[in-house]
Image (spheres, helix red, strand yellow):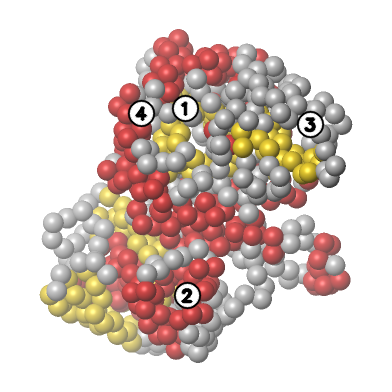
Amino acid sequence: MTKRLYLCIVFKSKSKNKLCNTQCLTVSLFPYRLFYFGNEIGSEMYCLSGYKQKSLSHFPVRKAFFIKTNGNINIKDNIKIMSDKLFIFDTTLRDGEQVPGCQLNTIEKIQVAKALETLGVDVIEAGFPVSSPGDFNSVVEISKAVTWPTICALTRAVEKDIEVAADALKFAKHKRIHTGIGTSDYHIKYKFNSTREEIVERAVAAVKYARKYVEDVEFYAEDAGRTDNEYLARVVEAVIKAGATVVNIPDTTGYCLPDEFGAKIKYLFDHVDGIQNAIIATHCHNDLGMATANTIAGIMNGARQAEVTINGIGERAGNTSMEEIVMILKSHKELNIDTNINTHKIYPASRMVSSLMNMPIQPNKAIVGRNAFAHSSGIHQDGVLKNAQTYEIIDPHDVGIDENSIILTARSGRAALKHRLEVLGIELTQEKLDKVYEDFLKLADRKKEIHDDDILVLAGADRSINHRVKIDYLQVTSGVGVRSVASLGLNISGEKFEAAAEGNGPVDAAIKALKKIINRQMTLKEFTIQAISKGSDDVGKVHMQVEYGGNFYYGFGANTDIIAASVEAYVDCINKFKIENI
């Protein structure tokens, strides 16, 4: 008899630390012990208990491996287990979007969500539906737009939050409610003015209420990093008994040391009865630069879901970087832990998020920074030329950096531009493509070569179409030994305005001319200039923060003329002011 290849996926058993003694044609104990079998990799999978093509992300997978056999499969035979599965929970669209100035509209969020699906993430945290109508609508539309990942909505341990989240998830193919409450004494005393006992009761009630709407409920113990381990174990045990399928252990303030955080996860596995019935997750912040290290420590001590963001973006100093966790596990095969991530899609996804959120990637950022695979030392260059592994532990192609990527020029046609946009994960309508192509030709006339980051800027350039304030023209005279003078024309809701001003340099002169037209008390608080690639003809990106009326507004501009980019960024801020009339 010819041997056949089977994929066996073993789910966590009610019997702690034991694999099932079931043969391939026998079913037992759904949902805690379950087997899927197929004839080959990628074939249609069947659950023997009658569930066909059930999403695996709903269940706590313990092992997955391939075997060949001509008879029944006995799990206790000498079968080599290939690896554990780590679920990747991406919160770029929720926690990552909390960065000031990085808010996306619904269309942009869908674009990122589709890129995350292509990347292979298991769970997309799409938003906090009760926080605003915009967030609610984004969760609804993302649920419609993607197919395979679980769509997750955040809530507090409040019934109204949970009801709104359930409503927002109504179109999701696989849905999860992420509810929770603070568990550290800091939160219990100062945030909730409560007691430990009341917090446990509220946590259990929230999980039970969420289970009325969805089968997949994740509970977060906010500030678990500073929560007493014994009390944290009580909370975790209680919410698992209440029906939580995933329990999130966040280092909310980024305070823990890696050994300390790893020990916390181990303590839970050693002291929580029934912990095998849920997936333990990590959610680490980078306030002390230890988010990635803490996440890896948690994984090595049993956590099997990592909550991460693209480029490590997030509130304050950011979150755990998805690309770092994935490539650490891929590089350290001895850990025997795999993810579903298609690493070749990492670099395009990174650049897309950076462009859409107007958040530059630091050049020395691990994995995706422009210097991550650059070598300037003569000794290093010599070693890399002889054998790349002398100084490179990661092949740049593994993360999607194509050294032979197409460089577009003024002679490139629409087809080449469309192809490059598709490679970068951007789909445009024909009308939008025509507009981008016009802008591309204008830029190509000023630059010899057009790179990926230039294209991403062009693809997002139409955000200003509906702005009330637009630049008609800008003319600046500047040089050594002369005063800088700027003349500026603005179109404000169809009405034309002009002004001229002198300044301490061309940018100062242009902004002073702008302030003569927009006569408001505005203060420039932050001004950052970044070259997209390299060369004197490069596109410059300008990020600004302007204070007006006690609020801070963030603006972005991109142009081969850095003075024009600066004025564009300031005008972008003004268009966000919360006033009736400019």
Q: How many other residues sit within 10 Å of disc 2, few (<14), some (14-19) or many (≥20)?
A: some
Question: In the depicted view, which residue is nearer to us: 413 or 441?
Answer: 413
Q: Which residue is mark 4?
A: 162
Amino acid type shown at disc 4: Ile
Q: Amino acid at mark 3?
A: Ile
What residue is drawn where x is 37% and y is 54%?
104
| Position of residue 453 measured from the top left corner of the image (x, y, whole percent) | 51, 70
Q: Which mark is residue 215?
A: 1
Between label 3 and label 2, give the one nearer the viewer: 3
* First reached walking from the N terminus: tag 2 or tag 1: 1
Mark 1 residue crowding within 10 angstroms, few (<14) / some (14–19) / many (20+): some
Q: Considering only order in the chain, which callout, 2 or 4, is on the residue closer to the N terminus? A: 4
Q: Position of residue 339 (x, y in %)?
A: 66, 44
Q: Earlier in the sequence, mark 3 or mark 2?
A: 3
Question: Residue 418: which disc?
Answer: 2
Q: Earlier in the sequence, mark 4 or mark 3?
A: 3
Judged from this view, the residue extending furthest toward the front is: 1
Residue 582, image x, y percentages? 16, 63
Mark 1 vs mark 4: which is more N-terminal?
4
Q: Which mark is residue 73?
A: 3
Are dots 1 and 4 in contact, CB under 8 Å?
Answer: no
Amino acid type, mark 1: Glu
**SS at circle 3:** loop
Q: Secondary structure at mark 2?
A: helix
At x 67%, y 62%, the residue is 372
